[in-house]
Amino acid sequence: MKKRGWKRSFVVSLCILVMPFIVLGCENEKNSTSNEANVSSEGDTGTNSDIARINVDRFANILDLSANPTEEAHGVYETNKFNHFSDLGAWHGYYQPAKDNKKLLGGFAGPLIVSEEYPVNLSDSINRIQITNKETNEQYDLSKSKYIDLSSYPGRLEQKYELGDLTLDITLIFVSNRTALIRTNMVNTDEESLELDISWRGSVFNSVIDGNNTLDIGTSLQKDGNAIQVNFSNVREQWNYFATDEVKYYISHDKKINTEINGLDYISSLEDSVSLDPGETFETYTTESYTFTEDEFSQEQEKSSDYMGEPESHFKDNKQRWQGYLDKTFTGEKVRDFPQYQNAVVKSIETLMTNWQSPAGAIKHDGIVPSMSYKWFMGMWSWDSWKADVALAEFNPDLAKNNVRALFDYQIKSDDNVRPQDEGAIIDAIFYNQNSSRGGEGGNWNERNSKPPLSAWAVWNIYEETNDKEFLEEMYPKLMDYHNWWYTNRDHDNNGVAEYGSMVSEANWKTDEDGKVIKDKKGQPELNDEAIIEAAAWESGMDNATRFDKEGIGEDDVGVKVFENKRDGEVVGYSINQESVDLNSYLYAEKGFLKLMAAELDRNEDEKTLSKDASKLKMYIQENMYDKESGYFYDLQINDDGSETKLLVNRGKGTEGWLPLWANLATDEQAETVKDNIMDKDKFNTYMPFPTASKDNEKFSPSDYWRGPVWLDQALFGIEALQNYGFDIEAIEETKKLFYHAEGLMGNAPIHENYNPLNGKGISTKNFSWSAATYYLLYKNNILSNNPTTQDAFK
């Protein structure tokens, strides 16, 4: 059910330059540059019945996965030096070997493993094949193959070698959230019979290098019948690495092997040599499992007979699953008209699927992490999740639902033993390990602040795609509790307009040089205003945005101050002294999505209340947060009782100023002037458009996180803001720039966290989920249609 049907019909001609279709990085002859290469003769599916199916096999090497893994996984910006592949929520992944590293050929490089919260390399190549001609006693040198193809496809990795009298094919897929399945296939292409000895060689690292620090992780190897087991030691390094002695990495063969271990190296050989007549094929399978607990290990062992017993059924299922993702994506008559975007869109899907994490530790449901490439991003953040979910709803709605649940698993309840005053709140981020206040060892778990309220946006878009009323009924009361929390704990003057702030937290107390809490004369901890302001900026999601600079700008700007929010005389949280236009636009939009849900669930009183409150908030934002002279929306500074206000025009323009258009609450006249600001080349219409601070903002910095770089989520909101008010030509123009001006996006480079607005260079970390989700949604809802994800409850 698509309730957005009232939106303007797409009457603007899409005058987009159609470039020749090119697959970069492909070494496969089957990758054609013709349009016909985009489709296959396979039967159409019900979701893609109006065009020929776009075959998953044609998307080779759209992301460079070549690597030379070492003990030092991270390079610049604590980001993995290489890109890797993972799937099905596994906590490990693989690279393709760099072609210039002879040692790595014959196996998949890595693996990369996530040590509960930190991605590290376990090996440079943990299981690579060696083939010896038994008659001549010569070992095949894979680096001298007549032909080598190391390719990645959606959902699988492949290696192909032509060795004169023998071809070797190796393919890897994931068959569960803990196990990869590898098929090794050899064919005798000679006119004479071959007698071959087959073995596999590998090694593991026993240290992690992070900058100048080297950490011993205590790995060891053990024989276990037809398997090789990597054992781990109990290492609990809060900021670098976690493992217990229950963790295992397990390599199992379907045929009998003999294994010799020498320290951290091993070699496993087939007991029997392989005889191949001309044209004959030999096939063997291995599994590689990474598990955290004895229970997980036992469960994977029980499944191993299925993995090995009917391996080809898993390869078939894997291909069908990934083809299904594409079938749901490439729908409609316009797909054929814009083939040049398809690689970027498939790369977006691959990025999201690699960042999929299954339940483990404190994480109870599947979800999407921001990036498996970044040391500090191996948890789930709330607004990151909501953005990923809106894209996932289109092609993997079950994962989208579970990702929502993963954060709501930790929604604060009234009987919470840590912060019952925050009933209804969704905390900032969850990780494998909870923090000390919850009895855990983790340092990354964060419940000092929440994140912008976009969960109802995600849930409604999931519902529109699935029509799953049970899911809507499950989530609606939880969403209402979260929505109401903003007004009980973040509305300092109780005027129905919220502020960003912080929860009550030990992180907000002043400490001395020894880390001890400083107390006042009454024995109470002294507040650290800077810590609370930091938490408020984190709560906005725009960590270092210019509008949160404590000192403010100009003589009549008092700067950022902290207010205590009390209920029944008790402090329940803190607000800063500004009503942020983005926060209240999100809340207005959320009222719209909740109203639509209430209508579906026959919550008539809720509908009325939400409509009434939305009307008041809309009027307030229109009248108090818009500056006629500059034609833009800004945050509103308030005093303690809300009797005095100041529109913070002086702090410059940021992305928050187009959120009223995304929320569908601006007047047409206001929208016109905001559009003019967006399209001004000296403001937001930069080479890579939608910088987080306007180019004319005196604090604009093109490479400084939220002070200038282009964040794709805000760009999406900007495009949808234009769409909402009929500026379709402008929306298309800016969308083209976002695709074509992002460094490497249309080639085989990774999707970055953000981009330099002046030159399109990718900055911060890479393989970033919400950037990938944005490109997916821009393709589906702007390139192929004019169907933004925004609320339409209040027309």
Image: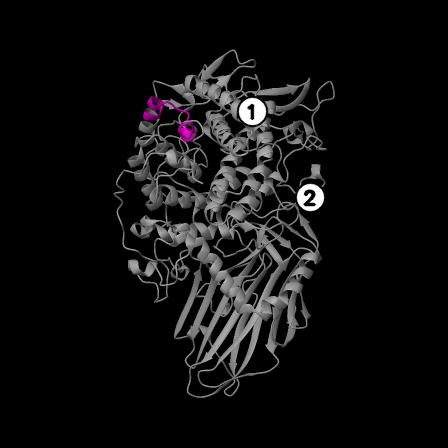
| Percent coordinates x, y for residue 375 in the rendering | 55, 47
* Disc 2 target residue: 441
Crowd band around label 2 with a 10 angstrom C-alpha radius: few (<14), some (14–19), many (20+): some
| 127 or 425: nearer the viewer | 425
Start-end of magenta stretch:
658-672
- Colour treatment of the image: one colour
Residue 710: quarter of image: top left
Vertical position of residue 361 compared to residue 205: above or below = above
- Identify the disc placed on residue 605: 1
Question: Which quadrant is home to the C terminus?
Answer: top left
Question: Which quadrant is home to the N terminus?
Answer: top left
Q: Within the magenta stretch, is there residue 299?
A: no
| 334 or 141: nearer the viewer | 334
Callout 1, which amino acid?
Glu
Residue for point 45% across, 28% down: 546
| Left or right of residue 531, residue 673 in this image | left
